[in-house]
Image (cartoon, helix red, strand yellow):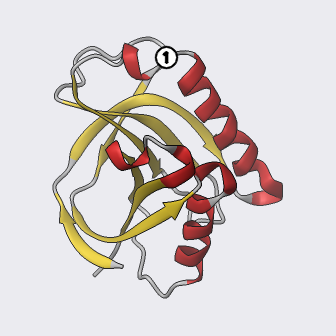
Amino acid sequence: MQTRVIASFEVVGISVRTEKKDGQAIRDIGALWNRFMTESVQQNIPNKSEETIYAVYTNYEGDYTQPYDLVLGCKVESTDAIPEGMTSVTIQGGNYHSYTSRGNILAGSVANTWKQIWDSETNRSYTTDFEVYGEKARDPQNAEVDILISTKD
């Protein structure tokens, strides 16, 4: 884990409101990823500044055990033209603790890293947390995914 200062930026994509209770988040997140891939959402996002996929956790009602929004999308230069059925979210600028998940995404490598984060003593701010699926995540069986957690320090 390392601390990084992130400048704010915009992401446009599709979203779901979910919660960890009774495995609901696992079902909702899987369905959102399926929709993102099968409906070619990435190709339909206007004003993309890069092809990296961001999974943004935001609008927490409390901590990670409470309802929150997940947005899957791409970083954009402008939110002037958001297609119907999509939304935008601002990654809040500030201090983030950065974790790297390595391994098979389909076998739960990212979920296992989240479990480590939940068990950590990180002083989370619960504004925006996000996963970065860049070039090193192209091979899902041998992926590297950065997870950035907004902190109060």
Q: Which amino acid does label 1 sit on?
A: Ser
Residue, disc 1? 40
Q: In percent of the image, x 59 and y 36: which residue is there?
A: 16
Q: Position of residue 48 (x, y in %)?
A: 24, 25
Residue 50 vertical placement versus 91 (above, below)? above
Could you tell me if residue 11 is visible in this image?
yes
Residue at figure coordinates x 34%, y 19% from the top left: 45
Looking at the rendered structure, the secondary structure element under dot 1 is loop
Q: Pointer 1: residues within 10 angstroms few (<14), some, or many (20+)?
A: few
Numbered disc total: 1
Locate residue 130: give its quadrant: bottom left
Farthest right residue in view: 22
Classify 41 as above or below 77.
above
Residue furthest out toward the bottom = 121
In the foreground, 118 or 62: 118
At which x and y percent is residue 138?
Answer: 43, 40
Where does the C terminus fall, quadrant-wise? bottom left
**Residue 37 occupies quadrant:** top right
**Percent x, y of residue 6:** 20, 60
- Along the line of sight, the residue nearer the viewer: 16 or 32: 32
**Residue at the location (28% across, 16% down)?**
46
Quadrant in which the N terminus appears: bottom left
The answer to whether residue 63 shows anywhere in this view is no
Q: Residue at x 41, y 66 (%)?
A: 100
Left or right: 79 in relation to 69: left
- Measured as percent of width and height from the top left, residue 93 is found at 21, 58
